[in-house]
Image (cartoon, rainbow, N blue to C red):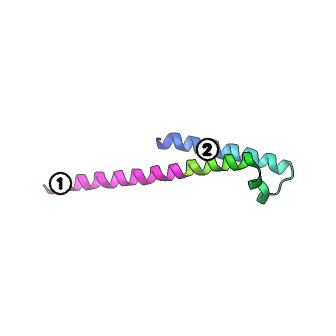
Amino acid sequence: MKRDALEKHLTAAKTKLDARSKTLKGNGVAEDAYCCDPVWRTLDASRRQMATRLHAVGKLEKREADAAARKEGGSEEE
């Protein structure tokens, strides 16, 4: 996926997780007990998955930029 789309998905996932956390807090659930709520766990997993994918895209972009720099550097020497 492209960085823009992943950032949008990550923002949406964080928003949903915050909304669920606010609901749980309103119901009197302690923060360390959020992990017992299956909906919260699912939303947190989605957030972590998007963050991991975004990190992987960053690594890929860096690798491609390095490869392009090497190619450009090699063509100048010839």
Residue 14 position in % (x across, y down):
65, 47
Identity of the residue drawn at 39% across and 54% down:
62
Identity of the residue drawn at 43% across and 54% down:
59
SS at circle 2: helix
Residue extending farthest right: 28
Residue 77 position in % (x across, y down):
15, 57
Residue extending farthest bottom: 32
Q: Is residue 29 left or right of residue 69?
A: right
User: Magenta part of the protein: which range?
Assistant: 52-78
Q: Is residue 57 left or right of residue 27?
A: left
Q: Nearer the viewer, residue 3 or 37?
A: 37
Q: Amino acid at mark 1?
A: Glu
- In this rendering, which labeled residue sits more in front, label 1 or label 2? 2
Find the distance from the CA under tag 1 to the CA under tag 2.
42 Å
Identity of the residue drawn at 62% across and 46% down:
46
Residue 51 position in % (x across, y down):
56, 51
Q: What residue is disc 1 on? A: 76
User: Please, what is the dominant secondary structure of the magenta stretch?
Assistant: helix
Q: Are marks 1 and 2 in contact (CB under 8 Å)?
A: no
Q: Amino acid at mark 2?
A: Thr
Q: Is residue 57 above or below residue 1?
A: below
Q: What residue is disc 2 on? A: 11
Q: Is residue 45 left or right of residue 36?
A: left
Image quadrant where residue 12 sits? top right
Identity of the residue drawn at 82% across and 51% down:
25
Residue 74 position in % (x across, y down):
20, 55
**Label 2 CA crowd tier, 10 Å (few <14, some 14–19, many 20+):** some
**Label 1 CA crowd tier, 10 Å (few <14, some 14–19, many 20+):** few
Total number of numbered discs in the rendering = 2
Q: Nearer the viewer, residue 77 or 51?
A: 51
SS at circle 1: helix
Q: Which mark is residue 64?
A: none
